[in-house]
Amino acid sequence: MFEKISFLSFSNLIRNRSIQNFLFLAIIQSSNVLISIISMPLLIQSIGVDQFGLVNLALSVIILLNIVVGFGYNLSAPKDVAVNQKNKDALSHVVSNVFSGKVLLASLCALGVFVAVFGLDLFKEYQMILAYSVLLLFSEATLPLWFFQGMEKMKLISIANIFSKLLFLMGIVLFIHSPEQSKWINFMLGAFGLAINLFLLFYIHQILEIKFYRPDFSSIFKSLKSNVLFFFSNLASHISINGGLIILSFFSVAETLGMYSLAERVVMVLRLFPALIIQAVYPNSAKLYQSDPHSFYRFLKNVYLRVLLIGALISFSTYFMAEWIIQVLAKEKLEESVVYLKILSAVPFMACLNVGNVVMLLVADLKDLLFKASWMMCLYMIVVSSILTSIFGGIGLCYAIISTEFVVLVICLILIYRRNPALIRGFYT
């Protein structure tokens, strides 16, 4: 009897839309990380360390431009899709405007890259690699992750993502054999991604019966204008989360950079957990907030308590397993890297503390507050990290990163309470 009840509870849990969203988003992120780890030694053996560095440098430029291409749609579009799930005409207009806006931004970014490379003669060491990497912009523009996230149907896109990454891995094995072929690496990544995305668009149009209308530039401009704060929030968050290594490079030698980079990469993967939770529960939270606020608060509280429990487990496990993790990844004992990882192990739990606040900011459409919180966090991180790193080196940077997570929690609480105290009272009381 007990086994039957347990099975039914587990079955109901798996059928929960938010749980499914989280699981499939986790599969997508995990497959991306795994393919990256597998492809790294293959590429280094094929094109050499120097060209591998240039390929990654070009990719980092494209990732920054992809924030422009995304322009906050990853935060606004899932909500618009979730709210209009049952209205196919309204949903068709949302889908058409988002795709048109992202393709327009990708075209402008691609034009900017070509002007910089061929007109201004910039990025001299990796011009052709960067030029061929432009296809990644259109892969990002046509990626319908936000659509399936809003529809709470993540299974297909998670399978499609894994398939495109496996095609990329196969392409490396079959076609990349010398340094001269390095320009094709990012091109293949973009080409396979774009091909799979076009298949998904066909599925959306034919199977889900979503129409694609001609671009309505007034609607596109309106959506871009409404997403400006989301865009700058994403940009600030990108700098806050990924800027530590750049700051450390001004004050430390290459060996310290390597030690810190290894620990940081582990923590950044673990830090994906609260971000995935936010993306997973956002569509359902948006619907509940509009239809039944009481159910919204109850739902978010249940999610929040579980997130804190799992976040604490992740942080404690990372702390006690730090030496073993570094040993497995580096194939040798790196005591300095272990110290960094033990300090940074608190980051996943600290990030989980702010999950409830971020969801409330999103569902209540408080874009201006999210913008303020992101840039206040960014400025705090840059100032404090620079000071502590200059005095204490890598350890100072670790403590600066942890304090940033706590400060942004306090900032969000104060901003939400000042604008909408009912949200804070509804969730925390």
Image: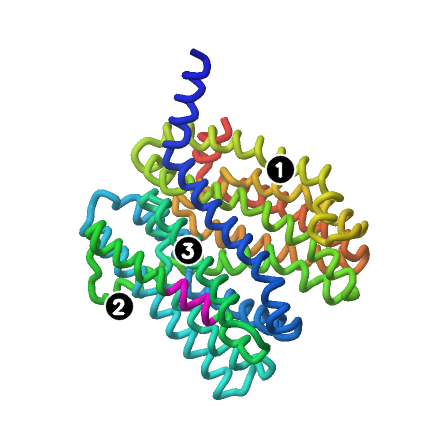
Disc 1 marks which amino acid? Ile
Disc 3 marks which amino acid? Phe
Mark number displayed over residue 314: 1
Q: Nearer the viewer, mark 3 or mark 2?
A: 3
Question: What is the C-alpha distance between the residues marked 2 and 1?
Answer: 46 Å
Q: Residue at x 29, y 34 (%)?
A: 291
Estimate the x, y position of residue 263 in percent, counting from the top left.
70, 51
Q: Nearer the viewer, residue 207 or 145?
A: 207
Check the picture and name the quadrant holding the N terminus.
top left
Q: Is residue 407 found inside the magenta-colored segment of the image?
A: no
Mark number displayed over residue 163: 3
Mark number displayed over residue 217: 2
Estimate the x, y position of residue 294 in percent, counting from the top left.
37, 28
The image quarter in which residue 192 lies? bottom left
Q: Is residue 193 found inside the magenta-colored segment of the image?
A: yes
Q: Secondary structure at mark 2?
A: helix
Taking 268 as reference, is 286 above or below it?
above
Q: Nearer the viewer, mark 2 or mark 1?
A: 1
Q: Nearer the viewer, residue 178 or 357?
A: 178
